[in-house]
Each structure stands twice: as structure tokens, then as C-alpha cells.
Image (cartoon, grey):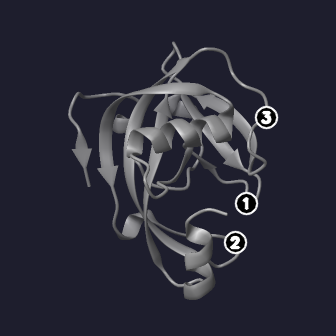
Amino acid sequence: MSYLGPIRKKLGTDLLLVPSVAGVIRNESNALLLVRKSEDGIWGLPAGAIEPGEGPTQAVIREVLEETGLEVVPTKIIGVFGGKHFRFTYPNGDMVEYLVTLLECVIKGTPKQGVDEEICKIEYFQEQDLPSIALPYPRDVLYGRGERCTFN
């Protein structure tokens, strides 16, 4: 069980601030990798909560591997996002507000077998074809325009 499981048992569905990470992975044509959640069909970046004792780099490596089967190397922090626009309510009623460290990652090696059951699809999207995603990351950050680190 994850770190959040016992907290949810005590807290119920009330709002919980969750430190988390998301991986920005682009292919050679600058298309962005997204995952689609099985539970609700919503697209998003490979992402998840940072577990106790884990740093953001370790967390994004773990989450990307679990959700996509890809081994990645984080190359830089490209943004930190949070606040009311990063609130999300899951289908079971659990409310969260994410504080997300967004890390640009490159793929190393070949994909592993066995993607997390919470993911039903993995796909690359060019910017003009980007579907609606769970959290409102700026497109310029997602598609690598600009060299600045964004804090929001």
C-alpha cells in the first residue's frame, strides 16, 4: 500500500496536498508522451506522488517505469506547479491538490514488459493534436519552448 493509503483511511475524501512529479518525454519529432488512465479515461503525463524517503528524480524514474515500461533519465526540472488549478477529484471522491515538480526526461534502453494496470493507453501527441489533459500545464513548457524554469 502506498504512503497515501493509511492517510486516506483517516482523512476520508477531504482535500489533501500531495507532493508529486511528472515526466515530460518527447520523441525525435517533439511529440509528447501521454498516458490514459483506465479508471476515468483522462489523459495525462506519466506522474505520481513522491513517496517518503524518495527524491523527485527517484520518484519520476519509478513512476514512468510503472506507468509506461520505459526507463528514463531525468535531465532537468522544467517547472514547479501547484495551487487551486492543480486540484483534482478522483472518481471515488478523493480530492487532491498536487504540487508537481515537472522533469524533462530522456528514454534509455528498451521498454520493459508489464505496464501498470491503471494505464490503458500510451501515445505520443504533436502539439496540434494534444487532447485535454488532467492538469493545466503550459504548452510552451510541455513542448520545450524557452529555456527558463517555470514556477507557478
Q: Name the residue under label 1.
A: 40
Which marked residue is nearer to the observer: mark 1 or mark 3? 3
Q: Is residue 84 above or below residue 15?
A: above
Image quadrant where residue 109 sits: top right
* Disc 1 to disc 2: CB gap under 8 Å: yes
Task: Name the amino acid, label 1.
Answer: Asp
Which disc number belongs to residue 91? 2
Count of numbered marks: 3
Determine the secondary structure under disc 2.
Answer: loop
Sequence-first disc among 3 and 2: 2
Image quadrant where residue 79 sits: top left
> Where in the figure is residue 80, as x and y percent of width and height?
31, 50
> Where in the figure is residue 134, as x and y percent of width and height?
55, 55
Q: Name the residue under label 3.
A: 114
13 left or right of 81 in image: right
> Where in the figure is residue 123, as x and y percent of width and height?
67, 31
4 left or right of 85 in image: right
Q: Nearer the viewer, residue 138 or 22?
A: 22
Spatial CA distance of label 1 from label 3 is: 20 Å
Which residue is located at x 34 percent, y 61 percent?
82
Sequence-first disc among 1 and 2: 1
Spatial CA distance of label 3 from label 2 is: 25 Å
